[in-house]
Image (spheres, grey):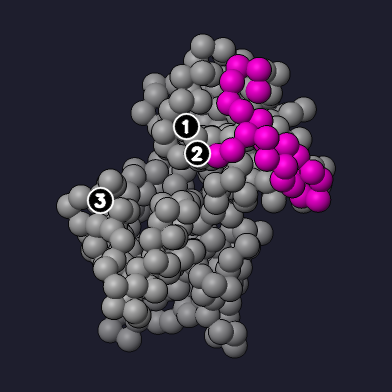
């Protein structure tokens, strides 16, 4: 069974290629160029050579599903083409299909952790939830399953790679320009991001940080509402901050319990296949150490000195890998 990947050269597309080629059994991929990518390029899926074709009706014909992993514009173009040629399911990692009435929000890692059977409603448009929402849903549902949460406050530190390669390049160029006292490129953030923390972008930025914050909240509310283990975890108070890092989300979480079970009990109950727990004998996880790893890592768990019912947590997640592994897991469900 073959799956088509539109945007195979994007950061998300490369993660899909890596996972599809190295998992067992390997996922058959047909690579399709998004806007700005060059058809005819020879590349790799895992260790196997693959040719990138152009986007047309023939390139998606016969595919079981189509991954959308390119730019938003490329995804919209692909959706227009697929609407004219119904057949393949759509797995959207870009959010381009999110407002469609036939779209369904998906996060297989959370769905499996909830121990709930996900009913097959015949949906053909699947939007992968925001990686920050997936990470927080894994964390909060697991906590709630063992110890009831009263409330929580979470600071979310976003990487430049959430804006794809243009965001990564702008951070890199700004860093170099600042060190050499040159003007700063501002196409993505419209303000200084190098060596800086941002509560909002500049007025001319193509996307607002507040919009991303709302999207994370909406997705998280849906994932926390899934039935099964951890159901009923209250929504946290969230604040999204743009960090001057290239890759990987970091989260500083304050959680108040109805009755604090203590750090050791929390550590033993939190670990799952998707959650690595770093106890006090280990260094806390970092966004750098988590690069290329699936799921999330949690560490630096400590009691709040001013509230005996609360604990502090430090979480990290590879945003691209987390989104890609959920997309590939969904593709396997469709086979």
Residue 73 visible in rendering: yes
Magenta stretch in the rendered image? 37-59
Give the structural element (helix, strand or loop) at label 1.
Answer: helix
Is residue 46 covered in magenta?
yes
Residue 287 percent across, percent down from the top left: 51, 70
Q: Which residue is mark 3?
A: 205
Depth check, front residue: 297 or 69: 69
Q: Is residue 298 left or right of residue 162?
A: right
The quarter of the picture where the C terminus appears is top right
Give whichever of 72, 220 is nearer the camera. 72
Q: Nearer the viewer, mark 3 or mark 2?
A: 2
Closer to the eye: label 2 or 1: 2
How far, Cα to Cα, is label 1 from label 3? 20 Å
| Residue drawn at x 43%, y 73% as measured from the top left | 313
Tag shown at residue 229: none
Compute the Cα span from label 2 to label 1: 12 Å
Q: Residues within 10 Å of mark 1 (few under 14, many from 20)?
A: many
Q: Residues within 10 Å of mark 2 (few under 14, many from 20)?
A: few
In the picture, measured across the screen, residue 11 lies left or right of residue 136, that is right
Indicate which disc, 2 or 1, sits on the residue closer to the N terminus: 2
Question: Is residue 59 depicted above or below 243 in this figure?
Answer: above
Q: Position of residue 332 (x, y in %)?
A: 70, 36
Q: Give SS at disc 3.
A: loop
Which circle marks residue 75 in the picture? 1
The magenta stretch spans residue 190: no
Q: Is residue 211 above or below residue 76?
A: below
Q: Residue at x 39, y 74 (%)?
A: 176
């Amino acid at each position: 069974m073959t799956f088509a990947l539109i945007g195979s050269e994007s950061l998300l597309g490369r993660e899909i290629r890596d996972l599809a080629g190295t998992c067992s059994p390997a996922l058959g991929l047909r690579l399709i160029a998004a806007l700005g990518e060059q058809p005819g390029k020879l590349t790799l899926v895992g260790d196997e050579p693959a040719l990138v074709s152009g986007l047309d009706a023939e390139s998606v014909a016969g595919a079981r599903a189509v991954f959308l992993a390119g730019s938003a514009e490329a995804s919209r173009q692909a959706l227009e083409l697929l609407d004219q040629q119904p057949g393949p399911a759509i797995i959207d990692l870009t959010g381009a299909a999110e407002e469609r009435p036939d779209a369904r929000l998906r996060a297989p890692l959370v769905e499996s952790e909830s121990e709930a059977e996900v009913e097959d409603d015949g949906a053909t448009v699947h939007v992968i939830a925001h990686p920050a929402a997936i990470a927080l849903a894994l964390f909060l549902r697991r906590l709630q399953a063992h110890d009831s949460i009263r409330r929580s406050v979470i600071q979310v530190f976003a990487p430049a790679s959430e804006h794809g390669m243009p965001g990564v390049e702008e951070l890199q160029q700004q860093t170099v320009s600042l060190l050499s006292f040159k003007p700063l490129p501002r196409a993505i953030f419209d303000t200084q991001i190098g060596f800086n923390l941002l509560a909002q972008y500049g007025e001319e930025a193509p996307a607002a940080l507040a919009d991303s914050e709302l999207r994370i909240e909406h997705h998280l509310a849906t994932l926390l509402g899934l039935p099964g283990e951890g159901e009923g975890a209250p929504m946290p108070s969230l604040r999204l901050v743009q960090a001057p890092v290239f890759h990987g989300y970091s989260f500083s979480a304050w959680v108040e319990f109805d009755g604090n079970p203590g750090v050791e009990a929390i550590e033993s109950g939190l670990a799952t296949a998707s959650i690595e727990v770093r106890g006090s004998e280990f260094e806390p996880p970092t966004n750098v150490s988590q690069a290329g790893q699936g799921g999330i890592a949690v560490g630096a768990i400590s009691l709040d000195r001013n509230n005996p019912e609360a604990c502090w947590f430090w979480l990290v997640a590879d945003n691209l890998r987390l989104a890609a592994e959920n997309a590939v897991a969904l593709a396997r469900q469709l086979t």
